[in-house]
Amino acid sequence: MTDLSVNKKAIDAVAAVDAAQVNTLAAQASRAEASALFFAPAVKLGADFTMLAKPTGDDRKSNLWVATRDWAYDVCATVLAGEAGLAFLNDATTTGKAEMAITQGKMKGQTRDKKYIQQQVGKLIGLIKSDLKKAADKPSDGASDAVERTDCDRFLEALTKAAKQCNKAKPDDSIPVEYIAAFEEMMAKLK
């Protein structure tokens, strides 16, 4: 049988998990802040995070949308593959299978095909977009804690389930009869 005692090895492992969680939260906050800082010039022009998606349909007619997406794509491509990588990606004569030895950027030293580099640029834009979306979705009423909203949702779902169970023609006896009567009385008062 495995030793399940409280020992130094177990304590050190849990301490590492706790430290990693703290570092993860700090990194997420830092990334969100950097995303907002990056996108600030576009916001001044009237853009929002939805404009980081590829423009389709009528969106292609919006100069702001197209300019915002192109700008974000160019910046992210330059970060990942350098200026030469950006030129490679923008070259219409190269196919998705064309390879490039990357000499600049985060991917420096790698040889990758155009399609892979495009995917990595898309992922980076997606991270920025999700950070901006989270910031935009954050409630301004002070209830910024996601746990509170989740608990409220669970509470409302539980009430809905209880109401369904109480109103069944043949209840499964998971709720005692006296609770059903009290629940029905409470619901009648709310009407």
Image (tube, helix red, strand yellow):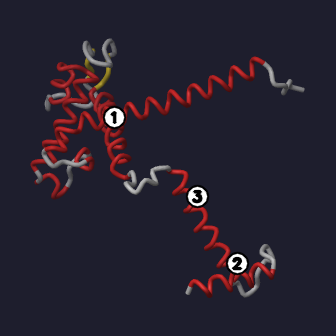
Of pointers 2 and 1, the one earlier in the residue sequence: 1
**What residue is rendered at 32% in x and 38% in y?**
128
Q: Which residue is mark 3?
A: 151
Answer with the quarter of the image where residue 98 lies.
top left
- At horizontal 61% and vertical 28% (from top left) the residue drawn is 18
Q: Amino acid at mark 2?
A: Gln
Q: Which residue is mark 2?
A: 165
Q: Given this view, does label 2 or label 1 mark the residue nearer the observer?
A: 1
Q: Nearer the viewer, residue 106 or 157?
A: 157
Quadrant location of the C terminus in the rendered image:
bottom right
Tell me which numbered mark, 2 or 3, is placed earlier along the sequence.
3
Which x, y percent locates residue 100? 25, 18
Camera-side residue: 99 or 38? Answer: 38
Label 2 vs label 3, nearer the camera? 3
Query: CA gap, disc 2 to disc 3?
Result: 21 Å
| Residue 53 as seen in the image, left or right of residue 13 | left
Q: Residue at x 32, y 44 (%)?
A: 132
Task: Specify few, some or many for label 2: CA neighbours under 10 Å numbering under 14, 14-19, or 20 or more.
Answer: some
Q: Choose the circle earlier in sequence order: 3 or 1.
A: 1
Distance, label 3 to label 1, CA atoms, is: 27 Å
For the residue carrying disc 3, how many other residues have a C-alpha within 10 Å: few (<14), some (14-19), or many (20+)?
few
- Please give the residue where the numbered disc 1 appears in the rendered image: 33
Mark-to-mark CA distance, 2 and 1: 47 Å
Question: Can you give x and y, in whole percent of width and height, for residue 143 in the image?
Answer: 46, 54
State whether residue 61 is above or below residue 13: below
Q: Secondary structure at mark 2?
A: helix
Q: Position of residue 103 (x, y in %)?
A: 25, 12
Q: Which residue is rendered at x = 27% and y = 47% of the image?
A: 49
Give the structural element (helix, strand or loop) at label 3.
helix
Which amino acid, mark 3?
Answer: Asp
